[in-house]
Amino acid sequence: MSNSNKKWFSLNLNSSTKQTSASCGCGNTAGDCHSKEEPELSEQEFLAAAVDASIGEETHKDGFEQVFDVKMDRRSAFKKLTASLLIGAGAVSTSCSTLAGDDSKEKAQIDWEEQFKGNYKLMSDDEKKATVNRLVRSYQLRTGKTISMSSQNAHKDVLYGYAFNISKCQGYMDCVTACVEENNQDRNSQMQYIRIHEMKDGKGFNFNEADDNYYHEVPAEGHFYMGTQCFHCDNPPCIEVCPVQATWREDDGLVVVDYDWCVGCRYCMAACPYDGRRFNWSKPEVPENEVNKNQHYLGNRMRKKGVVEKCTFCVQRSRAGKNPACVEACPTGARIFGNLLDPNSTIRWVLENKKVFRLKEDLGTEPKFWYFMD
Amino acid sequence: MSKHRSLYIVASYCFFMMILNSSCKHKEGEYHNVTDKIEMESKNYHGVDLSSELFLEDIEMIEITEGEHTFLIPERKGKIKGYACTECHSKPLPKMKGNEFKKAHWDLKIVHANKETMNCITCHNSQNMDELTSITGKSINLNNSYKLCSQCHTKQFEDWKGGAHGKRIGGWAPPRASMTCVNCHNPHQPAFDKKWPARFNTQKIKERK
């Protein structure tokens, strides 16, 4: 049933060998991957396996022992719980049905593999590639459209940083539009990662009195504009509170979310002092012709209902050497992005030569997002 | 005997410190703040395997060096429709004034400083219309028009050289390419216009009711 060198439980749903080898996390195409040689299951064997997957060793114990004698961590608990659900609902009917087509079998196989994959943070590069391939194939099977998805890791000697010039921002909100289009945010709830706060001159940074949803000609007389988004803190409180470690800081400083591992508890949103995170209250929807097909697993791939998301400094762009969409869209040059470890980078010049500050610096969150003025 | 003993103590102390040092090797969260981290980790920075060159392929660029900064700016002359100016301005400007010639640039409005401070020939070389001129009458190449602007806008010039003013072209990785003054500012009316924001969030209004 399950492969001994895999980190998660897998099941061969009798689909064609090509997909089986592609979906196997071992990444070995040469052919010493176990799942290839596995014999096909009869219906009886399958059900036995399903029972085994859902309750496993507990079959020989009485009720008390089953409850109190089981060494169960969170992952195996989830694994077993969802295993029984999924087997009961979808997978069995598909794999046992002679009427089901190859496509639906492949879909079921992909869904199975996706359901029981591990945390992205813990995956090897091959496993990352495998899950990305599955997601691309799944999207293809469901919509008939091909997307490209990257699992590019952090580059060496890179730590991303951002600077925002308060004197330059005019409140045009071109950055917000570019961000929504780039990152496939839900159009129905009009989710936006960036907020531009219109603040009155002479009142300081008063977020309570600031307006982040103005609609009049800008820049308005007697006001200045200040953008906020995820600051990619170096000591982020949001990742500390996550009960399932679905959010973490990558080596290049990006704070990212594994949307497939997030359970939607929203602790991170409560912990973030900057209102940097957003929650999908409903199923995020983007019109098919507006979907940005250049995606990254940790970035702008399609999310589902009930997960948290946020700015990733456009990981799909920044790890390809491009500037985030907001930086590229800003017509005033108020947004500066770069590598903090490169002593010759423009972001370093700003930090060393301008009077920079960060929001709520006293909290010790160490945001990598600096503000400055001309 | 005591000599041996003190030697032994010193040796064990050294050993201890070595262990202590090696156990304090830099791992996650060992820096006091991100500024320390940047300072420490950029000490052995060897460059990245990313480059912006690919994004700059389609744009004609020229390399400039100002002070300690060397970077690329877009070439300008090829972008001006009416260049070379001498195709019409065949004679020096004073000789072209008068009624026998067609009026040119009549629709150009100058909203840049006040009229006492600037007029056309503050920037345009009246003897050679293909070039610009500095305040002291030195010729300035149209491709290097930032040299003209920097005569008055010294603070902006400093910020631009460093990268705090002006937008980057291409990606964040080296080589650095930045827009030059006239790529964003119309030199005849350099201020940015007021305009309506790109979007309005109607959902936010509903949620906050």
Image (cartoon, coloured by chain):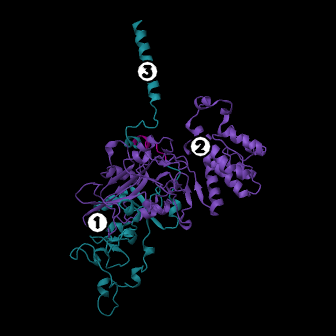
Residue A33 visible, this orientation: no
Instruction: Determine which residue is flagged by label 2.
Output: A118
Q: Chain of mark 3?
A: B
Instruction: Choose mark 1 or mark 2, whichever is in front.
Output: 2
Magenta residues, dominant SS class: loop
Local crowd at mark 3 within 10 Å, few (<14), some, or many (≥20)? few
Looking at the image, which residue is at 44% across and 49% down? A342
Instruction: Choose mark 3 or mark 2, whichever is in front.
Output: 2
Looking at the image, which residue is at 39% across and 82% down? B86
Task: Tally the numbered discs.
Answer: 3
Shade representing chain B: cyan
Q: Position of residue A84 (x, y in %)?
A: 64, 43
Please check the rendered image and state whether residue B42 is part of the magenta-colored stretch, yes or no.
Answer: yes
Q: Observer-nearest residue: A198 or A101?
A: A101
Q: Observer-nearest residue: B96 or A85?
A: A85
Q: Secondary structure at mark 1?
A: loop
